[in-house]
């Protein structure tokens, strides 16, 4: 499986790279993707939601009516959930939403997402480039040259580049990450993925199984 490498001006460089079929050409597993995305989103939740129960409300504990003879139901105190301002019955409490997944399953999910991108022709490889400083206009120009400016983009770099990151920070439809940060959610959440040349080599060296 070969892909052409493009220059940042949108033309082909003449170089082609061979992708590992064990990473970029497997039969996608939708359930693995679902579980990995579910875990990613669950791990983002702070779980700090909290409501006061009956014992936590700061009101008097005095009985508001006598026990019998009122003709109505008995009430212990104004803290009861049946009164406005009383505690909430079975309200949300702080909790941890995170859960664990098998490493091999997460790897399968990542490979499945990458395979979908290749299958849908949504993976582009561009020549390695650098930026002398944060230049948002340059990133916009590169995206237009690659003809993917109307899409939700994921830029994957071989290593962190502060200038490239800062250049894209104000662009809502572009996210820049390094290869070490690649995850299933970002791959699925993007309509097009751009690899800076070298990313595929790092992935293949780490997970390759030709």
Image (cartoon, rainbow, N blue to C red):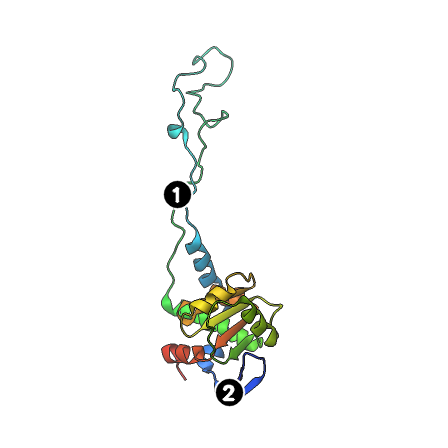
- Of helix, strand and loop, which one carries label 1? loop
Residue to which mark 1 is pinned: 94
Residue where numbered disc 2 is placed: 16
Compute the Cα span from label 2 to label 1.
Answer: 52 Å
Left or right: 70, with 100 as reference point: right
The answer to whether mark 2 and mark 1 are in CB contact below 8 A is no
Between marks 2 and 1 in the image, the one whose residue lies nearer the viewer: 2
* Label 1, residues with CA under 10 Å away: few <14, some 14-19, many ≥20: few
* Image coordinates for residue 5, horizontal then vertical, percent: 52, 83
Residue 64 seen in the current view: yes
Q: Is residue 111 left or right of residue 149?
A: left
Callout 2: helix, strand or loop? strand
What is the number of callouts on the image?
A: 2
Kindly identify the residue that appears in the image at 49 percent across and 19 percent down: 73
Quadrant of the rendering where the C terminus is positioned:
bottom left
Write the residue at 60% across / 67% down: 151
């Amino acid at each position: 499986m070969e892909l052409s490498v493009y220059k940042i001006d949108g033309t082909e460089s003449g170089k082609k790279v061979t992708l590992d079929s064990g990473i970029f050409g497997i039969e996608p597993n939708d359930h693995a993707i679902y579980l990995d995305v579910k875990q990613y989103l669950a791990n983002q939740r702070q779980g700090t939601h909290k409501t006061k129960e009956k014992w936590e409300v700061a009101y008097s504990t005095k009985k508001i009516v006598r026990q019998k003879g009122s003709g109505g139901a008995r009430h212990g105190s104004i803290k009861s959930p049946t009164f406005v301002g009383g505690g909430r019955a079975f309200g949300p409490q702080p909790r941890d939403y995170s859960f664990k997944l098998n490493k091999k399953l997460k790897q399968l999910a990542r490979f499945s997402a990458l395979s979908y991108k290749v299958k849908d022709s949504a993976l582009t490889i561009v020549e390695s480039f650098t930026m002398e400083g944060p230049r948002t206009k340059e990133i916009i120009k590169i995206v237009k040259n690659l003809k993917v400016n109307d899409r939700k983009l994921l830029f994957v770099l071989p290593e962190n580049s502060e200038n490239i990151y800062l250049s894209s920070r104000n662009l809502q439809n572009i996210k820049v990450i390094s290869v070490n940060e690649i995850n299933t959610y970002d791959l699925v959440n993007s309509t097009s993925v751009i690899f800076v040349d070298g990313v595929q080599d790092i992935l293949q060296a780490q997970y390759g199984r030709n």
